Image: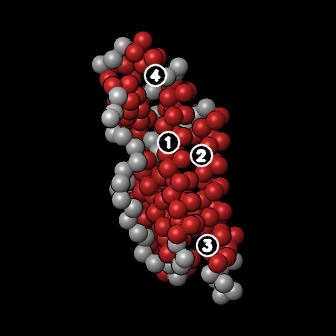
Amino acid sequence: MTTRRAVSRTRILAGAHEILDNGVYGDLTVDALARSLSMSKSTLYKYFRGKDELVCAIVSAVCDAAESDLKQVAANERDPAKAIARICAILARHADDMPRAALLQIDRLPSLCRDQIEGTRGKIRVALEQQFARRGPGAVGAPLAATTLQASMRAAIAASAKGEYRHGRGNALRAAYGLLAPGLELPALPTLTGERHAR
């Protein structure tokens, strides 16, 4: 059974996520969030000590979900090409779930958030590299292939976050993957079901 406290916490996180996704990092203040939720600042402070804790909760949830999905791919997918495609789909969902301001202004985030995002990106790169290496001697050099693929997709995500591609961050990544997949002999990107964040 969902408690009232859990509902309020979820509502606060969703409101903060919306502000960060639709604006810049500086737009998220306790005052702005309280106004947007028609909630008192004192109520917000019952759940979060401040903006940093709130932002870290959002980033942590997105990164933890991606890392959990990576573990499932490593444990369950036997075909390296399909595993690479699933990892890229995980990165697409990660891009969709991470607030736009967090992607564009990572340097403004609390250091704990920056470290977690970079850690998750590193785990994605390692997972890609491992799968490229599993493809065997005929495969493209695993470290180069993993780095190139991830860098291309991150560039597509950044372009979308900046408004240069107006079809969504995950779709920008999917488009970049579609351009690279034939040359890397990869299957189509799978669709992952379920939305990770509350909006």
Question: Residue under circle 3?
Answer: 131
Instruction: Say above or below: 71 vs 162.
Output: below
The amino acid pointed to by label 3 is Gln
Question: What SS does tag 1 mark?
Answer: helix
Examine the image and state in which quarter residue 197 appears: top left
Q: Where residue 117 is drawn, which disc sits there?
A: 2
Instruction: Say above or below: 20 vs 151.
Output: above
- 3D distance between C-alphas at marks 4 and 1: 16 Å
| The C terminus, quarter of image | top left
The amino acid pointed to by label 2 is Ile
> CB atoms at circles 3 and 4 under 8 Å apart?
no
Question: Residue under circle 4?
Answer: 47
Nearer to us of marks 2 and 3 is 3
The residue positioned farthest toward the left in the image shown: 38
**Mark 3 or 4, nearer chain start:** 4
**Mark 4 or 1, nearer chain start:** 4
| Residue 35 point in image, percent of width and height | 33, 19
Q: Where residue 19 is drawn, which disc sits there?
A: none
| Residue 153 point in image, percent of width and height | 52, 61
